[in-house]
Image: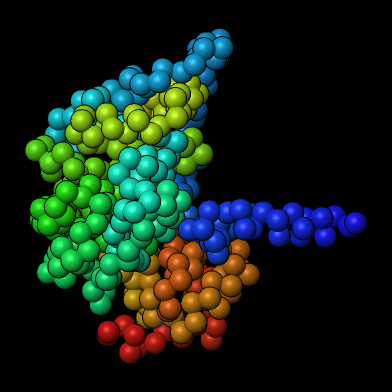
Amino acid sequence: MTRASTSATAADQLAPLLRDNLRGWTAYGAPQLDVPVQLNTNENSYPVPRVVIDAMVQALAKAAPGLNRYPDREFLALREDLAAYLTRTEDLTLDAGQIWAGNGSNEVLQHLVQAFGGPGRTALGFTPAYSMHPIIAGTAGTTWIDGRRGQRFDLPPESTIAQIRAIDPHLVFLCSPNNPTGTALPLDLVEAVYDAAGTAVVVVDEAYAEFRRAGTTASALTLLAGRPRLVVTRTMSKAFALAGGRLGYLAADPALIDLLRLVRLPYHLSSQTQVVARAALAHAQVLLAEVEAIKTQRDRIVVALTELGLSPVPSDANFVLFGGLADAPATWRALLDRGVLVRDVGLPGYLRVTAGTPTESTAFLQALAELGPAYRPLQEQETR
Ligand SMILES: *Cc1c(COP(=O)(O)O)cnc(C)c1O
């Protein structure tokens, strides 16, 4: 028997064993291609700075002899540092009891779904938003419901509230600034969603909060007091240039966090993860200076795309969604042929590009300008 037929038989035998609600699913798979300009997963393009590397290596050396022991299951020192960081940057007071963390914010989202979703329960989100929200909800057996957005991917308050009332979900997912559109939600909408959501847990995914433009909305963290069903998730994957370190977190009422302890695996945050994240937090200033540089590139990309006759969506994140393309998949391919990897998020006529270094922005914009006949702005699409 050849290897191929063996594995086909194994696949045939295993397929019926899969849980019913996972049949026909495909695994999350943003391409990880080794091309010169990688602008497809909203990573921070800047390598970890030397001073932060040194702090991480020192912290790891100090922690290494103790790896025979399980890590602090409550990762208290890390939670204190995260609370101090939010307190310092968002003009509010949080303490460690209001903080929870996991291996990426994907894991804290999973904890939320495990605790408040599951079979027989529903989660509501508003597509296009973060593609992992429905996947994480679904893997726990939660029924996912796609809410409707407005013409320009906005969330008109009246229809948003009406949908929440009609569906009466157990979990509501908001994303602000939203991925893939880049737009931040006004705080009064978050408040209105919370009030309309009855007994649902309302999750505001703020993975890109640090990239907000000056003067746009404040963080939903400022709404936490007196709202025990509200959760705000954050990550160190983007602003802190730590996607490989896997550290995401949330802030919520300590009573809600107590329920998350029921579903987390014991010792889920390794000692290495804890010390590496703390070393990065101790150098928040250095890392956040790079965030400012990235915001400059983001704004530059918006201006340049407009000059090319395309329609970028105003962005409060480290990426730009732009429309007006006659054929987005063909444009994606043509850019890749020129060594520039962007993201086709599946919206007809649109692509998403991450803002990285000045050199990367130039490479992307030059490649796009060179395409000429390979893309053609559709004027009628812009005015919709
Ligand atoms: C990138 C991203 C995350 C981050 O996930 P991690 O697991 O923390 O790396 C979370 N939410 C949104 C909306 C994102 O775009």
> Residue drawn at (34%, 54%), measured in percent from left and top?
120
Which residue of the protein is positioned furthest toward the top in this rendering? Answer: 65
Seen from the viewer's position, the closer of residues 341 and 272 is 272
Relative to 125, 333 lies left or right: right
338 vs 230: above or below: below
> Residue drawn at (36%, 58%), measured in percent from left and top?
143
Which residue of the protein is positioned furthest toward the bottom in this rendering? Answer: 380
Relative to 356, 212 lies left or right: left
Place of residue 22 in the rendered image (x, y in percent of width and height, measured from the top left) = 51, 57
Is the image coloured rainbow, by chain, by secondary structure, or in one colour? rainbow
Place of residue 244 in the rendered image (x, y in percent of width and height, measured from the top left) = 51, 39
Place of residue 94 in the rendered image (x, y in percent of width and height, measured from the top left) = 18, 29
> Residue drawn at (28%, 67%), measured in percent from left and top?
147
88 vs 144: above or below: above
Residue 244 appears in the figure? yes
Seen from the viewer's position, the closer of residues 305 and 171 is 171
> Residue drawn at (61%, 63%), measured in percent from left and top?
339
Place of residue 365 in the rendered image (x, y in percent of width and height, measured from the top left) = 47, 68
Image mark count? 0
Q: Quadrant of the N terminus?
A: bottom right
Seen from the viewer's position, the closer of residues 95 and 308 is 95
Q: Quadrant of the C terminus?
A: bottom left
Relative to 302, 330 lies left or right: right
